[in-house]
Amino acid sequence: MNDKDARNNIIQTVVNLLAEGEDVGRITVRQVAERAGVSVGLINYHFNSKNELLGIAVATHMAKMATDFSPSEDDEVSDPVDKLKTMLKQLYGYGEQHEKAIKFTITQNLLQGGFHAPLYVMPALKEIFGTGKDEMHLRTIALQILLPIQVTSLNPEKFLLYSGINLHDEGQRNEYIDTLVENVLCLGKNKPVE
């Protein structure tokens, strides 16, 4: 197994542990090594810390979800704005199921200045705006959409006190995402302002 394959195997092992419901705080390097069939030293070689490994694994899983996103045939979502909203709702739903892992990853990304997450909504924004916005504007819009979602998901209880919106309630969470996207995109009758 080459270095790249070993690294990917280690990341995938953590993704699998998280998918099985393992608490992010209880995952150990030794556990990952045993499960991946590698040495602890190899994990230490590829990752500076357990936190880095966990952050990369969760981010990798979320990125795959975002890039693989396609509305189901039952959804019949054809409007690009509705596709974006549906994708964000599905990602937030995953986050709700894996709250500790998501809080950990968001905290790590915010503290380390990680700006990868907004890039995953770029294809949706390009579909919405076409050639009406350049790359810099689209990246700014992506940040304007994702940062409030990330920040509010870190402490939904405080956000409930602030806004009256219970992010643990799927209906209220979906309405929050709809409102956020519509406000950021300045929608009037589902058309972005050019």
Image (cartoon, rainbow, N blue to C red):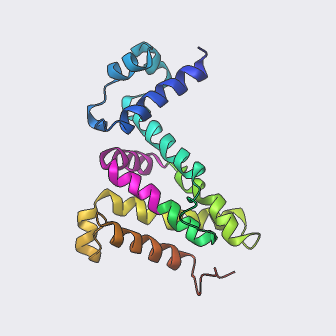
Of residues 45 and 91, the one nearer the viewer is: 91
Residue 154, horizontal then vertical, whole percent: 32, 57
Of residues 54 and 178, the one nearer the viewer is: 178
Count of residue discs: 0
Residue drawn at (23%, 64%), measured in percent from left and top?
157
Q: Which residues are magenta?
A: 89-113
Of residues 122 and 178, the one nearer the viewer is: 178
> Which quadrant of the rendered structure holds the C terminus?
bottom right
User: Residue 3, relative to residue 142: is it above or below?
Assistant: above
Q: Is residue 182 left or right of residue 94?
A: right
Residue drawn at (60%, 54%), measured in percent from left and top?
119
User: Residue 95, relative to residue 12: is it above or below?
Assistant: below
Q: Is residue 109 left or right of residue 82?
A: left
Q: Residue furthest front?
A: 74
Main SS of the magenta segment? Answer: helix
Residue drawn at (40%, 35%), measured in percent from left and top?
54
Residue 103 belongs to the span the image colors magenta: yes
Quarter of the rendering containing residue 156: bottom left
Residue 12, horizontal then vertical, whole percent: 48, 30
